[in-house]
Amino acid sequence: MVKKVKRSARVEQAIEFAKKAHEGQTRRSGEPFINHPMAVMQIVEDWGMDEDTIVAAVLHDTVEDTGITLKDIKEQFGEQVAFLVDGMTKLSKISSNMNDIDTYLPNTKDNLLRLLVATGSDIRVLIIKLADRLHNLRTLSALPPDKQRRIAKESLEVFAPLADRLNMGRLRTEMSDIAFSYVNPKRYNELHDLIDEYCKSAEKTMQKIQKEISAALGREKIKFTISGRVKSVYSLHKKLIKHNQNMGEIYDLMALRIIVNDITDCYLTLGVIHSLYIPMDGRIKDYIAMPKMNGYQSLHTTVITKDKKIIEFQIRTREMHEFAERGLAASFYYNEQKLTENYRTGKIQHLPTSLLWITELQETAAKLKAGKKVNVKKLRLNLFADKIFVYTPKGDIIDLPKGSLPLDFAYRLHSEIGEHVIGVKINGKMSSLNTKLKHGDVVEILTSKNFTAKEGWLDKVFTSHARQKLRAQLARQGEVIRSKLPKRKPKTKKKS
């Protein structure tokens, strides 16, 4: 059932505009085409996006599939909406030219570069694309089997990881499960039935534990809500691969999620749980003090109950829960900036550390539009690979690609710090500049104004950002040295 939303006059105008533009068009299923852009619009509404994004969502197919032009969109709904629709049109052209998922990934540079240009200038293009892809997955049964599999595989390998990078957990879960059901239907059905059977057998145990926990938290006067969480099919599939298909190693097939008012209550709740049940060694994870790569925060603990049952608990605040479910869209930071010039040029000031890769993406898009060369492999690493969070001694969090070295950290802080590095302390101990940084390391950069960058450092950096800054510094040093050399007098020919 679709949630009724009170829409502005501008959104209602866009809906009527789209209905007229798509009049007489149908989808492969035979339903009116307008149902698709309406569904995409409703998805971004549910995510709490701004009005320009909602308007662009319902108009996203008009330029590609009707006689409407970008000029028409701009005149009716403004430059921002036209910009977003144009980005969606570019992405659709990329997708329609793909015969195989492999060409979408780094083998075809043009596709990746166009993807980055289309999304890099405004991350909302990517958010509309994710909503578009989600609805296409929900209606995938109308397509022939070969297209079903191609779209599903692309969703698993490209769009679900992007949703995860944006910490849009609810979207990632739904997208992955639907896609997996088409990519490997036999395995999907096996695991779906297994989860179903486990949930039925564990129902009474879970109800009993909920009552025990509720009573204990009530005695401590902690305000909370508690609910069950069942692991998704695709998540279980990946975890079983990791544990060699051993179900005995899976402790979080079902979990209890407790949502409280503030961080203090999170830790108080953890203490209450551990006073009732025995915590399993090595299974307490504090993602509040040390968030996951994408910014996810929560306390996790796995316990053994009095009946010898193993149960996982997740404890978080309402704000953490919203961010875990909807990610970037949950507290859409662009509302603070209202699309200022800083935002349009990629200088977003209020993104959390876990989402700073968006800024990198925007800067890359600007370089591409200016005709500058970029390293495609490095771009794909930055977009899809894991990140690590490392800390300054003052507790500031810096995110870096996995594999980064101390000089990458130094140049991320400031290019001048990078230029004058004389050493590094990692977790309080002197370390080599060749040491790979790990998630959670505390890194202290030691500098001296008397020390400058060395050419040998090119082997001690991992990120393209650090390499670029280092090369620029080395080039400047070379110019300074050349300027200090005495000018050679022109040779005069000896008279014979």
Image (cartoon, rainbow, N blue to C red):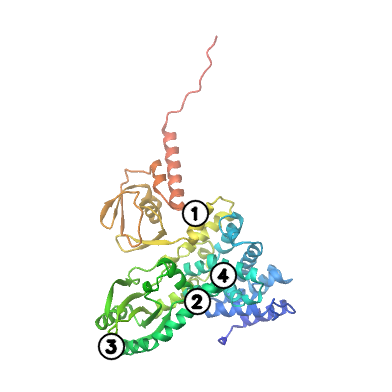
Indicate the position of residue 169 as horizontal and vertical percent values. 47, 74
Identity, as a three-letter code, of the amino acid under mark 4: Val
Per the image, label 1 sits on a secondary structure element best described as helix
Mark 3 or mark 4, which has the lower sequence index?
4
Residue at 29% in and 51% down:
431
Q: Which residue position holds label 1?
A: 378
Indicate the position of residue 356 as horizontal and vertical percent values. 45, 63
Mark closer to the observer (1, 2): 2
Instruction: State the CA–CA distance, disc 3 to disc 4.
Output: 45 Å
Mark closer to the observer (2, 3): 2
Q: Which residue position holds label 3?
A: 216
Mark 2 or mark 3, which has the lower sequence index?
2
Mark closer to the observer (1, 4): 4
Whether residue 170 is visible, yes or no, is no
Q: Residues within 10 Å of mark 3 (few under 14, many from 20)?
A: some
Mark 1 or mark 4, which has the lower sequence index?
4
Position above or below: 185 against 258: above
Per the image, label 3 sits on a secondary structure element best described as helix
Q: Which residue position holds label 2?
A: 190
Identity, as a three-letter code, of the amino acid under mark 2: Glu
Q: Which residue position holds label 4?
A: 183
Instruction: State the CA–CA distance, disc 1 to disc 4.
Output: 29 Å
Task: Kindly indicate whether the residue at mark 4 contacts the one at mark 3 (C-beta within 8 angstroms).
Answer: no
